[in-house]
Image (cartoon, rainbow, N blue to C red):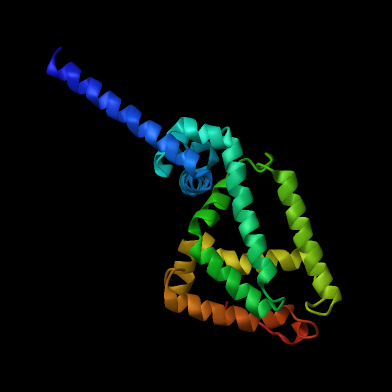
Amino acid sequence: MSCVTSNHMVTCSMTKKRHRSTARAATRNPDRTRGRILAAALAEFAACGFSGARVDTIARRAGINKRMLYHYFGDKAHLFRSVLHQKISERRAWGATLSSDPADRLPFWFKMACDDGDWIRLLEWEALQNPKQKVIDENERMSIACDWIERLRERQSQGQLSDEFNPRHLALAMQSLTMFPAAFPQMTRFIAGCSANDAKFQQEYSDFLKKFADAFRPKQAASIKINFVK
């Protein structure tokens, strides 16, 4: 047997052993493996969008073989759904611990948007698809949005938010205020003269959001006058 053939057999044997070792490790700690896959999938979907994302790349990022990825998540669409569910559940849990005061909520969600650029980019990729085409899990996500709007309506009835505004408009305004700097970094740079990741800008914008929160409070919206520079 030649050295080349022998070396090739040794390499193949070592590769198979690594795959078996990875599979055993994944079996021993499935939760950790799922977490690695979801983190790798979020990064890949954020970088390439759903259509451009490659399962091979996700498996490589996660340090597992593709067969193990399919074992845990079935296919790319199911993996994307799992990423969405994880991120949405994460945000709902955070929101449940916050006070109802918009002066607390707006700066918090702005900071979360700045700290989770992959999530923002994933949503932007999704927005680039055909507007007539439904997004993955659209009905469930629409239901989640409706639940949020209903919570805003309840807070209006309890006197925590101004009832002068349509709660759907309130939801759009709050989401726009907190996500825009991270979602459109070039516009933020043009307007603010610095990156949305700049610590000074983040502090100044958080302070602005705390003050601007008065616009959402009962009996105070009418007293807020905003002069836009032409």
* Image height of 154 relative to 67, above or below: below
* Image height of 58 relative to 124, above or below: above
* Image height of 166 relative to 126, above or below: below
Quadrant holding the N terminus: top left
Q: Which of the 4 image quadrants contains residue 161? A: bottom right
Between 74 and 229, the one lying in front of the other is 74
Say which residue appears at 46% left-offset and 76% top-offset: 201
Q: Which of the 4 image quadrants contains residue 15? A: top left
Say which residue appears at 54% left-offset and 56% top-offset: 120
* Image height of 142 relative to 194, above or below: above
Quadrant holding the C terminus: bottom right
Residue 12, horizontal then vertical, whole percent: 28, 24
Residue 188, horizontal then vertical, whole percent: 49, 67
Between 144 and 166, the one lying in front of the other is 144
Between 192 and 115, the one lying in front of the other is 115
- The reply to whether residue 166 is in sight is no
Between 56 and 31, the one lying in front of the other is 31
Say which residue appears at 54% left-offset and 70% top-offset: 111
> In screen coordinates, is 74 left or right of 22?
right
Residue at far bottom of view: 223
- The reply to whether residue 182 is in sight is yes
Residue 194, horizontal then vertical, whole percent: 42, 71
Residue at far top of view: 1
Residue at far left of view: 3
Residue 180, horizontal then vertical, whole percent: 56, 64
Residue at far front of view: 28
> In screen coordinates, is 129 left or right of 32?
right
Q: How many marks?
A: 0
